[in-house]
Amino acid sequence: MNIINRVPIDLHSHTRSSDGSLSEEELIDKVVENGGKFLAITNHDTVNGLDFASSYALSKGLYFIPGVEISVTWNGNLVHILGLNIDYTNSELIKSLETLRSFRIERGRKIAAKLAGAGIPDAFNQAMRYCDNPESLSRTHFNKFLVEAGYAKEGKAFDKYLAQGKVGYVKQEWAKLEDVVAWIIGAGGIAIIAHPARYGFTRSKLIKLINDFKLCGGLGIEVVSSSHSLNDIENIAALAELFDLYGSVGSDFHSEQSFRRIIPGINMALPSHVKPIFPLIGIIQD
Ligand code: AMP
Ligand code: MN
Ligand code: MN
Ligand code: MN
């Protein structure tokens, strides 16, 4: 018997506008097919595709929340902040994200140089083959190349080459936490800490992040995520309650993978003691 409650809500997903494998249209079709009712598309450092997605979702009867997932360097650590219900025509947000994306090509060349040093030639051009928008070049595109060219098994290229401390890793200074939260709020959105358990922080470091985030005006934290174990969900739910943050749920869907099944559009329900972020972004459930 399946005792896990599920909700037709997904507030974190990716398309080909950043490092996902599906187009906006394909993702929305899949979400509708899965029975999803509320979807946010949250690509890395870009709002490309949201305009089309918003009208396509409407035509399919899907409630659409425009979103973004922004790369932050906080105390030397990479942290992802989601902005939900943003006005994606906001010029300051658009300009700031453009600057952030401009780092990606340069970093991609450095990653490729490091991989070349490890005996893997031409990685820049090869990764680019998987990437629709060069400015959105991501480690995910390098991952695809490394797996398909046989340099790593599916699901192993980060551990072998791309993760922090590995031979192809290049340190990048992304945006500042306070700036990112300000851009999101300036664009009328709600800021949420993405997949907090994934950073490998100690409890006290995570609490420091939460405190800094709240001081900037951040309101939410992702409690349910495909990066979280049941134990992570419990821990983050307790922190959400303790620090009076609204809880969010997101599949963080990128692509269909043979080794891990993630269903875009559907998530586990929030633990009942967590205040849901849903009403703040216009989601009213019956
Ligand atoms: P980037 O923003 O280019 O540094 O790439 C980060 C992206 O790589 C994340 O958004 C994930 O989609 C992906 N990623 C990071 N770590 C892993 C991992 N260990 N396994 C698979 N994908 C990962
Ligand atoms: Mn990604
Ligand atoms: Mn992320
Ligand atoms: Mn994501």
Image (cartoon, rainbow, N blue to C red):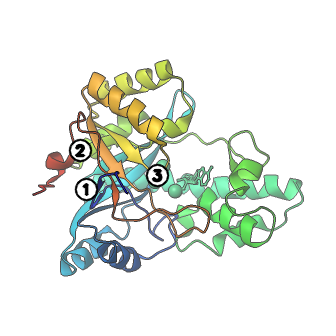
Q: Position of residue 276 (x, y in %)?
A: 21, 42
Q: Position of residue 112 (x, y in %)?
A: 76, 58
CB of mark 3 near ligand 4 (< 8 Å): no
Q: CA distance from mark 1 to mark 2?
A: 8 Å
Tell me the amino acid under the disc marked 1: Asn
Q: Position of residue 111 (x, y in %)?
A: 73, 54
Q: Label for residue 37?
A: none
Q: CA distance from mark 3 to mark 1?
A: 30 Å
Examine the rendered structure and indicate whether residue 98 appears above or below residue 128.
Answer: above
Which quarter of the figure has residue 246?
top left
User: Which residue is tagged 3?
Assistant: 226
Tell me the amino acid under the disc marked 2: Gly
Examine the rendered structure and indicate whether residue 74 appears above or below residue 266.
Answer: above
245 sits left or right of 223 in the view: left
User: Which residue is tagged 2?
Assistant: 186
| Extreme residue in the top direction | 204
Comes first in the chain, label 1 or label 2:
1
Q: Label 2's element? A: helix
**Could one spot residue 91 in this view of the protein?**
yes
Q: Nearer the viewer, mark 3 or mark 1?
A: 3
Residue drawn at 85 percent across, 62 percent down: 120
Pointers 3 and 1 in contact (CB under 8 A)? no
Q: Label for residue 90?
A: 1
How packed mark 3 is, by other alpha carbons closer than 10 Å (few <14, some 14-19, many 20 or more), is many
Residue drawn at 71 percent across, 46 percent down: 169
Image quarter (top left, top right, bottom left or bottom right) of the C terminus: bottom left
Comes first in the chain, label 3 or label 1:
1
64 sits left or right of 78 in the view: left
How packed mark 2 is, by other alpha carbons closer than 10 Å (few <14, some 14-19, many 20 or more), is some
**Could one spot residue 78 in this view of the protein?**
no
Tell me the amino acid under the disc marked 3: Ser
